[in-house]
Amino acid sequence: MDKSSALEYINQMFPTEASLSGVEPLMQKIHSEIRRVDAGILAAVRQQSNSGTKAKEDLAAATRAVQELMYKIREIKTKAEQSETMVQEICRDIKKLDFAKKHITTTITALHRLTMLVSAVEQLQVMASKRQYKEAAAQLEAVNQLCGHFEAYRDIPKITELREKFKNIKQILKSHVFSDFSSLGTGKETEEANLLQQLSDACLVVDALEPSVREELVRNFCSRELTSYRQIFEGAELAKLDKTERRYAWIKRRLRTNEEIWKIFPPSWHVAYLLCIQFCKLTRAQLEEILDNLKEKPDVGTLLMALQRTLEFEEELAEKFSGGTRNKETGSNTEEMDKGENENPTVLDIRRKYEKKLAAHQGTETEGKDGHRDLSVPGAGFNFRGIISSCFEPHMTVYVELEEKSLMEHMEKLVQEESWDIEEGSQTNILSSSMQLFLVIRRSLKRCSALTKSQTLFNMFKVFQKILRTYATKLFGKLPKAGTGIVAAATGTDGQIKTSDRDEKVICYIVNTAEYCHKTSGELAENVSKMIDSQFSDKVDMSDVQDEFSAVITKALMTLVHGLETKFDTEMAAMTRVPWGTLESVGDQSEYVNGINSILTSSIPVFGSLLSLIYFQFFLDKLAASLGPRFYLNIYKCKHISETGAQQMLLDTQAVKTILLDIPALGKQTSGAASYSKFVSREMSKAEALLKVILSPIDSVGDTYRALLPEGTPLEFQRILELKGLKKADQQSILDDFNKHGSGITQPPAVQSVVPAVPVAPTAPVAANSASAGVIASREDVLTRAAALGRGAATTGFKRFLALTEAAKDRKDGPFRKLFNP
């Protein structure tokens, strides 16, 4: 311990004077511990001294043992070297004898094989001269094996001579075989019974020769077989597009007639398969030449017939030489299209159909890919599909033009025959012409996809886009138009859209039809992208067409809104003709309100039953956005409005607001009505605020206007003074005061249907505290009056409101008294 630690320890042991009596026992205990530690140290030192002596003795003993071991190892190594020298001396002669034996054995084996090679070559020469193909084939195998043993002796003259002789014999065999095969197909094989057997044996010789010999033989045979085909169908008589089917009949007949004779070829040669490949390539070249040399566009019927027969022939070859099945994707597409032809599909049917098609496509995608791999004969790696038919692709423009003309005629006919009404019992509110149009398009797609899945199918897809755009234009043109021209201007209907009850139904049908076309055109594009070649699938897009139908939907819904606006014109005019300045009492809602209610009651249920929720909601938003501001502006069009007239108009405003809020329930589509109700309340609150300003006393009208209509303009304020019936002279003083205090109150930008929030007081110098206090008091008065007007109109009704205000005139205090205080 350091000094401080020792002191702390002593103070801890003897904290008081009385505890010092324990010093002696503690000292005895410490001395006893010191003696015990000293004894332990001494014992450890003695033990360590004894251990060091013993360790030295052990180390010396280990050193002696290692030295003895090293000596013994050296002795063993010396004896091993002596033994190795002795063994080498003994085996020196035996090793020489072993090498000699090995060389003699190799020499004897080589000489024996050389003798066999010489003999085999001589025998092979005799067999080749006698055309003994069967024996020569086996002998060729033997000579090839023997020659393999002499690869290391190529430079020896005798071996070189034998190899050259063997090469010549093979050339002789090749010439004999080619000579014998030249008679195949000439009719001699039927006259000489042994010729087929001889040619079959010759095939064994060809297999024993190099692979290039077999390829050359098969190629020459196929060329010779197609010589007559080339001569027949290059003539002027048969070198025509309408004779295409006879080409395929010729090769089928050839394969069938010579099937027995061609059995002489080993199956591994695939002679018939290679012959068909050469036939297809030759036919493609000839058809390309015929199509390119046509002076006029080919006849569509002839072209399609030739293409159809070509596709059938390619499919037969693919099945014959691959053992595969037909393209399942085409089959599934065809099956789905056939279903569509047997009935008029509904929206639900269309959706289910395409969902099933998508699931089937995903389930068979891998299987389809495997099918393409199975189309090739093992070792050949060739796909017959498209080998000939692809040459028709550049010349299919006439077919696309014919399909486009036919589709356009069908579309025009469907539009002309359209009744623009829905049949009784129909489950959908969609025009039949749209469903029939997509049915015709599906049939056209089925026909085209059966012929090609390349550029022509993509061109047909562009035709479908054009047809659907035209149909969208037809729907657009069926919408009612605004009145234009001199007559419309003279009658005051310029720009107005008049719609009857039937027109409104037709517009709803057009909305539903455009929605159906929007959805189905996207599904059509998805279907085409699955069946078309991969290089075109990314280009298949219907977004532009869908945008066209979206524009039709928007225009149709806006037409509905404009049609109702035109119907409201009479009621808005009736509102301005009411003598608001001479009304003596407040009664029930006015006749123009009943007219607005009648218009909406007759139209809204129809819209709600025919339109989907999303489009009905869109229509409601546009209607509220139109009618609310229009009602507000229509108040300015009235003449003098007395206090009683303003109270009656406020009652009418509340009635119109209630009518608008009940529209979702009237259309039986209440989903999403909350946002619509907020929108209606916000728009109609502006008209309520305007009427409250008109109701306010003359001396506080400016403050009330700034509080309730903060976005208003001085011109609107002047118009309000005119509505209150003030003369020009009286107006001027109020306007001057309004302009002077125009910045005295700051308001939020939006006018709410509730009492506006208290705005922040404007900053002013300290010296102007009294003026600021006056402004604040004035603002509080304005808000109190507005609150009173709102409570009177919204909760107690106008009759109760009038009673309260009359009673408040005689009172000296209370919130209603402030309405009459300066």
Image (tube, rainbow, N blue to C red):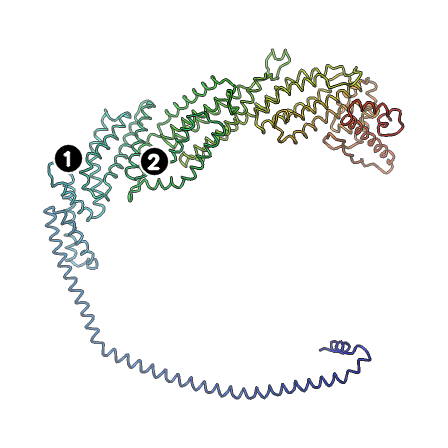
Residue under pointer 2: 326
Provide residue 430's location: percent of width, then percent of height: 51, 24
Single out the mark in the foreground, 1 or 2. Answer: 2
Residue under pointer 1: 186
Residue 382's quadrant in the figure? top left
**Residue lying at the far front of the rendered structure:** 425
Q: Is residue 293 shown above or below 585?
A: below
Left or right: residue 578 versus residue 75 is right
The number of numbered badges drawn on the structure is 2
Nearest the eye: 235 or 359: 359
Residue 794's quadrant in the figure? top right
Left or right: residue 65 versus residue 600 is left
Provide residue 159's location: percent of width, then percent of height: 16, 57
Binning the other alpha carbons within 10 Å of mark 2 as few (below 14), some (14 to 19) or many (20 upward) gives some
Residue 669 seen: yes
- At horizontal 19% and vertical 40% (from top left) the residue drawn is 263
The disc label shown at residue 452, or none: none
- At horizontal 46% and vertical 30% (from top left) the residue drawn is 524
Provide residue 234's location: percent of width, then percent of height: 23, 28
Left or right: residue 529 versus residue 187 is right
Q: Is residue 284 shown above or below 70?
A: above
Provide residue 120's location: percent of width, then percent of height: 13, 54
**Which secondary structure lies at badge 1?**
loop
